[in-house]
Protein backbone atom coordinates (compact mmCIF):
# COMPACT_ATOMS: atom_id res chain seq x y z
CA UNK A 1 0.00 0.00 0.00
CA UNK A 2 0.82 3.73 -0.04
CA UNK A 3 2.00 3.87 -3.63
CA UNK A 4 2.71 7.18 -5.30
CA UNK A 5 3.21 7.53 -9.03
CA UNK A 6 4.59 10.35 -11.12
CA UNK A 7 4.10 11.07 -14.76
CA UNK A 8 6.07 11.49 -16.86
CA UNK A 9 9.19 9.80 -15.55
CA UNK A 10 11.28 11.96 -17.81
CA UNK A 11 10.63 14.87 -20.13
CA UNK A 12 12.68 16.95 -22.50
CA UNK A 13 11.35 20.32 -23.58
CA UNK A 14 12.46 23.45 -25.36
CA UNK A 15 13.28 26.61 -23.48
CA UNK A 16 10.22 28.81 -23.03
CA UNK A 17 7.66 26.02 -22.98
CA UNK A 18 5.69 24.82 -19.98
CA UNK A 19 5.78 21.33 -18.55
CA UNK A 20 3.25 19.66 -16.30
CA UNK A 21 4.21 16.86 -13.92
CA UNK A 22 1.54 14.74 -12.27
CA UNK A 23 1.74 13.11 -8.87
CA UNK A 24 -0.87 10.55 -7.93
CA UNK A 25 -1.55 8.54 -4.80
CA UNK A 26 -2.76 5.23 -6.17
CA UNK A 27 -4.21 3.47 -3.15
CA UNK A 28 -4.79 6.14 -0.54
CA UNK A 29 -6.11 9.65 -0.14
CA UNK A 30 -3.35 12.22 0.15
CA UNK A 31 -4.40 15.17 2.26
CA UNK A 32 -0.98 16.71 1.80
CA UNK A 33 1.50 16.48 -1.01
CA UNK A 34 5.03 17.80 -1.14
CA UNK A 35 7.14 18.76 -4.11
CA UNK A 36 10.91 18.47 -3.97
CA UNK A 37 13.69 19.32 -6.32
CA UNK A 38 16.95 17.43 -6.36
CA UNK A 39 20.08 18.69 -8.02
CA UNK A 40 22.72 16.20 -9.14
CA UNK A 41 24.55 14.61 -6.26
CA UNK A 42 22.66 16.69 -3.74
CA UNK A 43 19.93 16.20 -1.23
CA UNK A 44 16.26 17.02 -1.67
CA UNK A 45 15.11 20.60 -1.50
CA UNK A 46 11.50 21.14 -0.48
CA UNK A 47 9.80 23.44 -2.94
CA UNK A 48 6.24 23.55 -1.65
CA UNK A 49 3.59 21.89 0.43
CA UNK A 50 0.07 21.56 -0.86
CA UNK A 51 -3.07 20.57 0.95
CA UNK A 52 -6.05 19.36 -1.01
CA UNK A 53 -8.30 22.23 -1.98
CA UNK A 54 -5.93 24.92 -0.73
CA UNK A 55 -3.22 27.05 -2.22
CA UNK A 56 0.25 25.63 -1.97
CA UNK A 57 2.72 26.98 0.56
CA UNK A 58 6.01 27.70 -1.11
CA UNK A 59 9.40 27.61 0.55
CA UNK A 60 11.51 30.71 0.63
CA UNK A 61 13.20 31.37 -2.66
CA UNK A 62 10.83 29.27 -4.75
CA UNK A 63 8.95 31.31 -7.36
CA UNK A 64 5.28 30.48 -7.11
CA UNK A 65 4.54 31.96 -10.53
CA UNK A 66 7.24 29.80 -12.02
CA UNK A 67 6.27 26.57 -10.33
CA UNK A 68 2.49 26.30 -10.30
CA UNK A 69 1.11 23.67 -7.98
CA UNK A 70 -2.44 22.40 -8.03
CA UNK A 71 -3.87 19.87 -5.59
CA UNK A 72 -7.43 19.63 -6.82
CA UNK A 73 -8.26 16.19 -5.51
CA UNK A 74 -7.18 13.82 -2.76
CA UNK A 75 -5.26 11.69 -5.23
CA UNK A 76 -3.71 14.15 -7.65
CA UNK A 77 -1.31 17.06 -7.47
CA UNK A 78 0.35 18.71 -10.43
CA UNK A 79 3.47 20.80 -10.75
CA UNK A 80 3.68 23.01 -13.82
CA UNK A 81 7.04 24.53 -14.67
CA UNK A 82 6.14 27.61 -16.66
CA UNK A 83 8.39 29.12 -19.31
CA UNK A 84 11.05 26.57 -18.54
CA UNK A 85 14.71 27.44 -18.91
CA UNK A 86 17.81 25.23 -18.82
CA UNK A 87 18.41 26.13 -15.16
CA UNK A 88 15.07 24.47 -14.34
CA UNK A 89 16.49 21.14 -15.45
CA UNK A 90 16.41 18.90 -12.44
CA UNK A 91 14.92 15.83 -10.80
CA UNK A 92 11.50 16.62 -9.36
CA UNK A 93 10.08 14.34 -6.69
CA UNK A 94 6.67 14.40 -5.08
CA UNK A 95 5.55 12.80 -1.86
CA UNK A 96 2.20 12.34 -0.22
CA UNK A 97 0.88 12.06 3.30
CA UNK A 98 -2.37 10.84 4.79
CA UNK A 99 -4.24 11.88 7.88
CA UNK A 100 -3.87 8.39 9.33
CA UNK A 101 -0.07 8.27 8.92
CA UNK A 102 0.62 11.94 9.18
CA UNK A 103 4.26 11.63 10.22
CA UNK A 104 5.30 9.67 7.14
CA UNK A 105 5.72 10.67 3.54
CA UNK A 106 5.39 8.29 0.62
CA UNK A 107 7.53 9.19 -2.35
CA UNK A 108 6.98 9.03 -6.05
CA UNK A 109 9.72 7.76 -8.37
CA UNK A 110 10.61 11.24 -9.58
CA UNK A 111 10.54 13.07 -12.90
CA UNK A 112 13.70 14.00 -14.75
CA UNK A 113 13.21 17.35 -16.53
CA UNK A 114 15.69 18.48 -19.16
CA UNK A 115 15.20 21.88 -20.73
CA UNK A 116 17.12 22.47 -23.94
CA UNK B 1 18.15 25.26 14.46
CA UNK B 2 16.97 21.90 13.25
CA UNK B 3 19.46 20.08 11.09
CA UNK B 4 20.66 16.69 10.00
CA UNK B 5 24.32 15.91 9.39
CA UNK B 6 25.67 12.98 7.46
CA UNK B 7 29.41 13.43 7.92
CA UNK B 8 30.48 11.07 5.15
CA UNK B 9 29.88 12.20 1.58
CA UNK B 10 30.83 8.78 0.32
CA UNK B 11 31.91 5.48 1.80
CA UNK B 12 33.57 2.54 0.07
CA UNK B 13 33.03 -0.93 1.47
CA UNK B 14 34.02 -4.35 0.22
CA UNK B 15 31.21 -6.71 -0.66
CA UNK B 16 30.43 -8.87 2.34
CA UNK B 17 31.87 -6.40 4.82
CA UNK B 18 29.86 -4.63 7.48
CA UNK B 19 28.55 -1.12 7.03
CA UNK B 20 27.75 1.81 9.26
CA UNK B 21 26.46 5.12 7.92
CA UNK B 22 26.43 7.99 10.35
CA UNK B 23 23.63 10.43 10.99
CA UNK B 24 23.51 13.14 13.61
CA UNK B 25 20.65 15.49 14.16
CA UNK B 26 19.85 18.68 15.98
CA UNK B 27 16.28 18.87 17.16
CA UNK B 28 14.56 20.19 20.25
CA UNK B 29 12.47 17.15 21.05
CA UNK B 30 12.51 13.46 20.31
CA UNK B 31 12.36 13.46 16.54
CA UNK B 32 10.83 11.16 14.03
CA UNK B 33 13.82 9.61 12.24
CA UNK B 34 14.05 8.04 8.82
CA UNK B 35 16.56 6.42 6.53
CA UNK B 36 15.88 6.38 2.80
CA UNK B 37 17.81 4.83 -0.06
CA UNK B 38 17.94 6.19 -3.59
CA UNK B 39 19.36 4.11 -6.40
CA UNK B 40 20.69 5.95 -9.48
CA UNK B 41 17.87 7.71 -11.27
CA UNK B 42 15.31 6.25 -8.92
CA UNK B 43 12.93 7.56 -6.31
CA UNK B 44 13.34 7.23 -2.59
CA UNK B 45 12.66 4.01 -0.77
CA UNK B 46 12.09 3.97 2.95
CA UNK B 47 14.52 1.63 4.70
CA UNK B 48 13.36 2.14 8.25
CA UNK B 49 11.94 4.67 10.68
CA UNK B 50 11.93 5.46 14.36
CA UNK B 51 9.04 7.14 16.11
CA UNK B 52 9.24 5.83 19.67
CA UNK B 53 9.85 2.70 21.70
CA UNK B 54 12.68 0.27 21.06
CA UNK B 55 15.70 2.28 20.01
CA UNK B 56 17.02 -0.46 17.73
CA UNK B 57 14.95 -0.47 14.59
CA UNK B 58 14.90 -3.16 11.96
CA UNK B 59 14.27 -2.27 8.37
CA UNK B 60 14.12 -3.80 4.95
CA UNK B 61 17.01 -5.38 3.06
CA UNK B 62 18.76 -6.38 6.29
CA UNK B 63 19.35 -2.85 7.52
CA UNK B 64 18.99 -1.67 11.09
CA UNK B 65 19.49 1.62 12.88
CA UNK B 66 19.91 2.61 16.49
CA UNK B 67 18.58 5.79 18.02
CA UNK B 68 20.95 7.17 20.63
CA UNK B 69 19.47 10.17 22.33
CA UNK B 70 22.62 11.00 24.26
CA UNK B 71 24.60 11.24 21.03
CA UNK B 72 21.79 12.68 18.89
CA UNK B 73 22.53 9.96 16.42
CA UNK B 74 20.65 7.49 14.27
CA UNK B 75 23.31 5.43 12.52
CA UNK B 76 22.41 2.90 9.88
CA UNK B 77 24.06 -0.51 9.91
CA UNK B 78 24.18 -3.68 7.88
CA UNK B 79 26.27 -6.71 8.83
CA UNK B 80 27.15 -7.74 5.29
CA UNK B 81 26.69 -5.56 2.23
CA UNK B 82 25.81 -6.75 -1.23
CA UNK B 83 26.75 -5.12 -4.52
CA UNK B 84 23.09 -4.15 -4.94
CA UNK B 85 23.35 -1.93 -1.87
CA UNK B 86 25.38 0.60 -3.85
CA UNK B 87 23.23 3.73 -3.75
CA UNK B 88 22.75 7.08 -2.06
CA UNK B 89 21.49 6.97 1.51
CA UNK B 90 19.63 9.82 3.13
CA UNK B 91 18.87 10.37 6.78
CA UNK B 92 15.91 12.60 7.60
CA UNK B 93 14.20 14.05 10.64
CA UNK B 94 10.47 14.62 10.71
CA UNK B 95 9.43 17.82 12.42
CA UNK B 96 6.67 17.45 14.99
CA UNK B 97 5.13 20.79 14.14
CA UNK B 98 4.36 20.30 10.49
CA UNK B 99 5.79 16.84 9.73
CA UNK B 100 8.07 18.22 7.07
CA UNK B 101 11.27 16.31 6.57
CA UNK B 102 14.66 17.81 7.26
CA UNK B 103 17.21 16.04 5.08
CA UNK B 104 20.82 15.17 5.47
CA UNK B 105 23.11 15.73 2.51
CA UNK B 106 23.29 12.04 1.77
CA UNK B 107 26.06 9.43 1.77
CA UNK B 108 27.01 7.62 -1.39
CA UNK B 109 27.81 3.98 -0.76
CA UNK B 110 30.29 2.38 -3.12
CA UNK B 111 30.77 -1.38 -3.05
CA UNK B 112 34.13 -2.89 -3.97
CA UNK B 113 33.99 -6.36 -5.51
Image: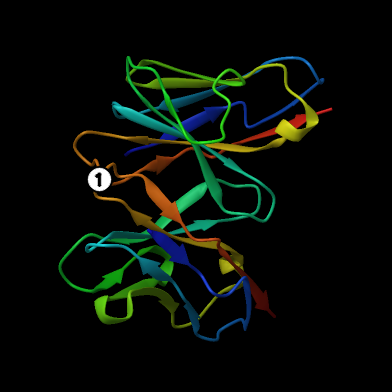
Q: Is residue A52 above or below residue B71?
A: above
Give the residue displayed 55% in from the left and 86% down from the top: B17
Q: Residue at x 39, y 49 (%)?
A: B101
Q: Which residue is mark 1?
A: B97
- On screen, B97 above or below A64? below
Look at the image and tell me in which quarter the N terminus of chain A lies. Answer: top left
Q: Is residue A8 left or right of residue A106?
A: right
Say left or right for A74 vs A91: left
- For the view shown, which residue lies furthest in the left direction? B53
Residue B111, located in which quarter of the rendered image?
bottom right
Q: Nearer the viewer, residue B96 or A93?
A: B96
Compared across the picture, whether A26 is left or right of A68 comes to left
Residue B86 to residue A29: above or below: below
The image quadrant that residue B13 belongs to is bottom right
- Seen as rendered, the residue at the extreme right is A116
Residue occupying image coordinates x 39% and y 30%: A33
Q: Give neighbour class at mark 1: few <14, some 14-19, many 20+ (Cα, 10 Å).
A: few
Q: Say left or right for A22 vs A95.
A: right
Q: Quadrant of the C terminus of chain A?
A: top right
- Residue A92 position, x and y percent, is 59, 36
Q: Chain of mark 1?
A: B
**Residue B70, x across and y down, in percent:** 26, 81
Figure check: A101 above or below A43 = above
Front position in the image: A52 or B57: A52
Residues B32 and B49: in front is: B32
Coloring basis for residues: rainbow
Disc 1 secondary structure class: loop
Residue B45: x %, y % from top left: 46, 52
Quadrant position of residue A25: top left
How many discs appear? 1
Amino acid sequence: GAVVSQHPSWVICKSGTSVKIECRSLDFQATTMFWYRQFPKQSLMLMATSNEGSKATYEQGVEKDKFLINHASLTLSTLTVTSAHPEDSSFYICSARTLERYNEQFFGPGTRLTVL
Amino acid sequence: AQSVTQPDIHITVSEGASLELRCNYSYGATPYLFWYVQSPGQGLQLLLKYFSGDTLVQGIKGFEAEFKRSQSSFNLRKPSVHWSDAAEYFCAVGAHSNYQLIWGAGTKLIIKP
